[in-house]
Image (tube, coloured by chain):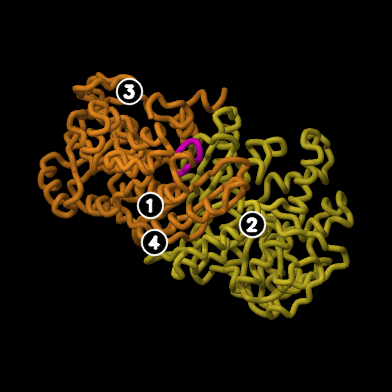
Chain colours: A orange, B yellow
C-alpha cells in the first residue's frame, strides 16, 4: 500500500495512535500548547510549504512564497491570540535554483518577521535532490485564561468568521488559468483575488483582541477551508453545527468574477486564513459592535450555530460523520475534503 | 548564479546579513536561546534530513531514519546540557512511498522520543513531488548559569571530546561499498562502525552533567566533523586552537578496519554526535576523573588547547582563516570542509 492510497488525516491519526496517552492532550488543536514552570504558555506551530503541492514557481514569485511561508504560521498564532516570540526557517533547496530566488525569498520572509515583531532565531538549510521544501516553526506566548481552543465550543454558540471567504482559492484558480498575463491585466477585481491568494494577512491583531473577550469560546484559523476546518472544530468539541451558506461573507470582487459560483469557493476554498470562532449567543451582538469599533475595516459575520452532535441533517455531500447541516440555496454536492495525499476534486 | 555555485555557510550568512542587529545574538550557536519572562531559558533547534543528501533509503532503513532524525536534534540539546521538553515533526513524503516505510519511521521516532522523555507535540505532513523530506524542531530547557555556548572558550582552555571520532563516517563508507551485504556479514568491527552511523547516541546525560561543571566553558556537538565544527567554535570565541591529531580518540573497530586512514576519518568525518568542549586548563584532570567516575563506559579525551587568534601555524590544508594548528604525524591535506551545496571531496 502506498501513501497515495490513504489520506493525510489518516497519517496524522497513525502518528497519534503510536504516541503515549499523556502526549495527546492538544493534538486536536492547530498549535501545541506548552506550559512553563512559570509565566505565559508557549504556543508552537509548524507548517510546510512544498513546491508543486502548496505553491508553484510559475504562479507565485519568490517574494510571495517568502511572505506566505511565514504568514501561514503567524495565522496559527493569530488563532490563539498569541504574541509572536520567534520563528525558525528550515529550507531544502535544489542546487540549480537561482541565487536571486533565494535572496528574494529571504528578504520578504524577514520583512514580514520584522513587521510582525517575530525575530528569525534559527533554522537549517540543505540541498534537496529536487524541488523547494520550506518548513517554518513559530513560537508565541499566550495566557492560559485567554487560550481559545478548538475543543471549547458550546451548544448554542454563534459561529462567526472574520473577513470574507473564498477569495484566495478563486485567486489561485485565476492564476492557474493564465499565470503569465495575470500580473498586468489591470483588472482590479482579479488583482484583489490574486493578492488574497499570494499575500494573505494573518489576523494577529484581531485574534489578540478576540482572545481577550470572555464571550469567545473556541477559535481557529481557516487554512484548508470551512468545509474541511469546521469539522475539525465540531469533532474536537464533540458537537454538531448548522451553517447558513447564504450568509457566508463574500467579497464584491468574488461576486463580480464568479457570480453564482462564489458560494462554492467560500465553502470549499482553502487558504483564506480568516478566523473561525464561536461566541456565546447572547453576547454576539455586543461583541460584534465592539469588534467593528476596534477594526472599522474588518467584518465579523455570524454564519451558523453549534448544536448537539448528530442532530444536524446531512444535505450537501458530507460523509455523514461531520454532523454539520449545510443549509444552502446553491448546490454543494461534489465538494471534497482537501487532502494533500489524495487528488482534490475541487481547488 | 545558482545555489551550487556558493556554499551552505554562505547562504546562512546571507540570511543573517538581512536580519536586524537585535536578532543576531545567538546565530553563532547551534541552538537558539530564548529567555522567558520567568523560569529557565528555552533552547530551540531545527534540523533537516533530506533523502539523497543526508540519507539514502538503500543504506538506511525507515527505522534508522526515524531514530536518527530525532537523535541529531537531541544531540543539539545535549550540547547545551538542556532537558528535552517537546519535539515537532515536519514531513513531506512522495505519494508512491510504501505505507510501511511511514509506519516504521514513525514507530522508531516515537520510541526514541519516549526513551528521551521528549514528547512529540505536533508538526505538519504533506505530499512531496519526489523524495523524502524530514525537518524536526526540538525545544529544551536549561538554566542561564549552565548554558555553555560556542563563544565562551577562553585562551588556554583544554579542548576535549567525549567518545571516539570518525566511526560514523567510516560506517557510512562501509555501507556505500556494499549496502546489501552489510547486514549479515557478521563482522563485528564493521557492524559497530555501521551502527555508529545508523544509530548515533545523543549525549544527553553527559551534556547535562558537563553543563553543571563550572570549569566547562564552551560546548557544542560534532555533527559535521572536527574539521568543520571546531572552526565554528574558534570563530565564535575569536580564538585560535592547536589540535594534536595523534591524540584523537579512535575506536578499536576504526583502527582495525582502516588502520592508518583512521585519523583522517576522525578529523574529517561527520555525524559522530560526540560533544566538543573546552575546560579551564587547571581543572581538566579533576573534571576528567569525576566524569569517568560518573560515566564508566565513556571517554573524555584532551585533544588540544585554545590559543590567541592567528597564532596557530597552518600545516594541513586549512584555508588559513581558521586559525587552527593541526599537528599531525599523518597527512591531512585534501580534507575538505563539508557543505551540502558543494560536492564534498571526502565523505
Residue A50 place in picture, x, y as percent? 50, 40
Which chain hosts label 2? B
Q: Residues within 10 Å of mark 3 (few under 14, many from 20)?
A: few
Residue A64 place in picture, x, y as percent? 42, 48
**Quick check: can you spot residue B324?**
yes
Q: CA distance from mark 3 to mark 2?
A: 53 Å
Which chain hosts label 3? A
Residue wearing tag 4: A114
Select label 3 or label 2 by which is in front.
2
Residue B81 place in picture, x, y as percent? 57, 62
Q: Earlier in the sequence, mark 3 or mark 1?
A: 1
Q: CA distance from mark 4 to mark 2?
A: 27 Å
The magenta stretch is: A46-54
Residue wearing tag 1: A43
Under tag 4, what secondary structure? Answer: helix
**Residues at discs 3 and 1 both on one chain:** yes
Q: Quadrant of the N terminus of chain A?
A: top right
Q: How many marks?
A: 4
Q: Is residue A346 left or right of residue A153?
A: right
Residue for point 27% across, 40% down: A189
Amino acid at each position: 500500500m502506498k501513501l497515495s492510497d490513504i489520506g493525510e488525516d489518516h497519517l496524522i491519526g497513525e502518528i497519534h495512535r503510536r504516541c503515549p496517552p499523556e502526549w495527546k492532550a492538544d493534538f486536536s488543536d492547530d498549535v501545541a500548547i506548552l506550559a512553563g514552570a512559570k509565566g505565559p504558555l508557549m504556543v508552537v506551530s509548524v507548517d510546510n510549504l512544498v513546491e508543486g503541492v502548496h505553491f508553484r514557481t510559475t504562479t507565485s514569485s519568490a517574494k510571495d512564497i517568502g511572505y506566505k511561508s511565514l504568514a501561514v504560521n503567524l495565522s496559527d498564532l493569530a488563532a490563539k491570540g498569541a504574541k509572536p516570540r520567534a520563528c525558525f526557517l528550515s529550507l531544502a533547496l535544489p542546487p540549480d535554483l537561482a541565487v536571486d530566488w533565494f535572496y528574494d525569498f529571504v528578504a520578504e520572509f524577514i520583512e514580514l518577521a520584522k513587521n510582525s515583531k517575530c525575530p528569525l532565531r534559527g533554522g537549517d538549510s540543505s540541498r534537496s535532490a529536487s524541488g523547494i521544501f520550506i518548513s517554518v516553526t513559530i513560537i508565541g506566548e499566550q495566557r492560559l485564561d485567554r487560550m481559545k481552543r478548538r475543543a471549547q465550543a458550546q451548544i448554542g454558540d454563534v459561529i462567526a468568521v472574520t473577513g470574507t471567504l473564498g477569495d484566495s482559492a478563486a485567486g489561485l484558480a485565476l492564476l492557474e488559468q493564465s499565470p503569465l498575463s495575470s500580473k498586468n491585466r489591470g483588472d482590479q477585481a482579479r488583482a484583489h483575488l490574486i493578492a488574497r491568494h499570494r499575500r494573505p494577512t494573518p489576523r494577529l491583531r484581531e485574534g489578540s483582541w478576540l482572545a481577550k473577550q470572555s464571550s469567545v469560546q473556541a477559535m481557529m484559523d481557516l487554512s484548508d477551508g470551512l468545509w474541511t476546518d469546521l469539522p475539525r472544530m465540531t469533532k474536537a468539541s464533540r458537537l454538531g453545527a448548522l451553517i447558513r451558506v447564504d450568509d457566508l461573507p463574500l467579497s464584491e470582487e468574488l461576486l463580480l468574477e464568479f457570480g453564482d459560483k462564489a458560494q462554492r469557493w467560500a465553502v470549499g476554498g482553502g487558504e483564506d486564513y480568516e478566523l473561525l470562532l464561536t461566541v456565546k449567543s447572547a453576547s454576539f451582538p455586543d461583541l460584534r459592535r465592539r469588534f467593528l469599533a476596534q477594526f472599522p475595516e474588518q467584518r465579523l459575520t455570524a454564519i451558523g450555530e453549534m448544536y448537539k452532535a448528530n442532530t444536524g441533517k446531512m444535505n450537501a455531500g458530507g460523509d455523514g460523520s461531520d454532523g454539520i447541516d449545510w443549509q444552502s440555496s446553491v448546490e454543494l454536492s461534489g465538494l471534497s475534503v482537501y487532502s494533500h495525499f489524495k487528488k482534490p476534486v475541487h481547488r
